[in-house]
Amino acid sequence: MKKRYRLGVAVVGFLLGATELARADDVQQAKAHFSIAARAYEANQFRVAIDAFEEAYRLAPRPAILFSIAQAYRRQYFAEQQRQDLSQAIAYYRRYIKDDPKGKRVTEAVSAVADLEAVAARIGLDPNAREAPVKAPESRGARLLVAPSVKGATARVDQGSPVELPNRIDVKPGKHTVVVEASGYQAERREIDIGPGESFALDVRLLEKPATVKPLVDEGVRLFVDGRFAATTPLVKALELPAGPHTISMSRRGHDPVSMQHDLNAGEFKSISADFSASSQRVTSYVLFGIAAAATVTGGVFTGLAFAEQKTATNLEDLASQGNLTTSQREQHEEAIRRRNLNRGIAF
């Protein structure tokens, strides 16, 4: 697979420099056809790959593409066992060897020809069949070759039924609207104008839909995504994040922060919530506040008791100034003074 990918890059790079052989728009279409052919080949859609490779060669005839055409015909023969595909594979390998005798894949092509000629002999096919010419586009209809950058995509032409991709779609000449869609990806809409007998390639790069996250928390909560500040609630709109794993953290004044892991899928909508616990500092402040409040109340009570004892002692002192106190009154006075001093100390 890696070898085929390197071949594609090399051929496309060479095509871009071949302006002496083709117009710039033909080169771009040749590049698109080759890219689509490579994807179709990897997806085992060899008929589509053959069409795309052959059109790429017609637009920008480079010998290396002949090897790719031969490879596709070879895989197609072993998939369906049709004699014509075997004949075409042998013919294109031979043409590649003839047109590029010092090419990088010549040794591989020679070996493939030997193997396929042995197969042809076993089934009674003439191994010396004449070289196959590169097919010209059909003169009346038109064809659309579409390959997206992701698996499982479909295409709709002019709001028709979805067609699985990569694929070849036969259309009438003229203007068409093509919509390429895949689950979890943003749809791509293209307007094309294709002429009679033309082959038009759409090499579509689909972009993933972002995942949407909506926090169900009170106002004033600060949100962090993967360690970076994102927003403060309330949000104007939900957070849009790329698919994949994320660490979402939330912080609220006076509470311990909450952190959670989420593995988000493309296009997914997820609501998240958090149970905040009061931080140790806030709990300590509440305890100290309660103690202070209780102490204030207690101090007020004992201050009142001290004033009451002071009043009793004062009344007894007034009686003493008018005459002698009885033994019981003197003891009561001393007890009032003692309790007053005690309550003052407790209140302090």
Image (tube, grey):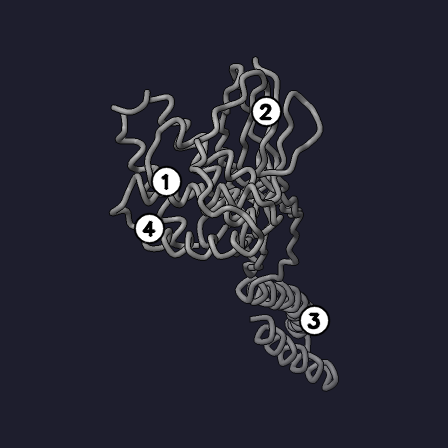
Where disc 4 sits, the SS reads loop
Q: Position of residue 11 (x, y in %)?
A: 33, 40
Where disc 1 sits, the SS reads helix
Distance CA(mark 2)–CA(mark 1): 36 Å
Location of residue 47 with respect to 193 vertically, above or below = below
Q: Which mark is residue 105?
A: 4
> Where does label 2 land, which residue?
178
> Where does label 1 land, which residue?
95
Where disc 3 sits, the SS reads helix
Give yes or no for contact between labels 4 and 3 (Cβ–Cβ under 8 Å). Answer: no
- Pointer 3 or 2: first along the chain: 2
What's the amino acid at mark 1?
Arg
- Pointer 4 or 3: first along the chain: 4
Horizontal side of 300 relative to 252 (left or right) equals: right
- Pointer 1 or 3: first along the chain: 1
Location of residue 100 with respect to 187 vertically, above or below = below
Distance CA(mark 2)–CA(mark 4): 37 Å
Location of residue 331 with respect to 195 vertically, above or below = below
> Where does label 3 land, which residue?
312
**Crowd rating for badge 3 (residues with CA inside 10 Å; few <14, some 14–19, many 20+):** some
Horizontal side of 264 relative to 105 (left or right) equals: right
What's the amino acid at mark 3?
Thr
What's the amino acid at mark 2?
Val
Nearest to the observer: residue 62 or residue 245: 62
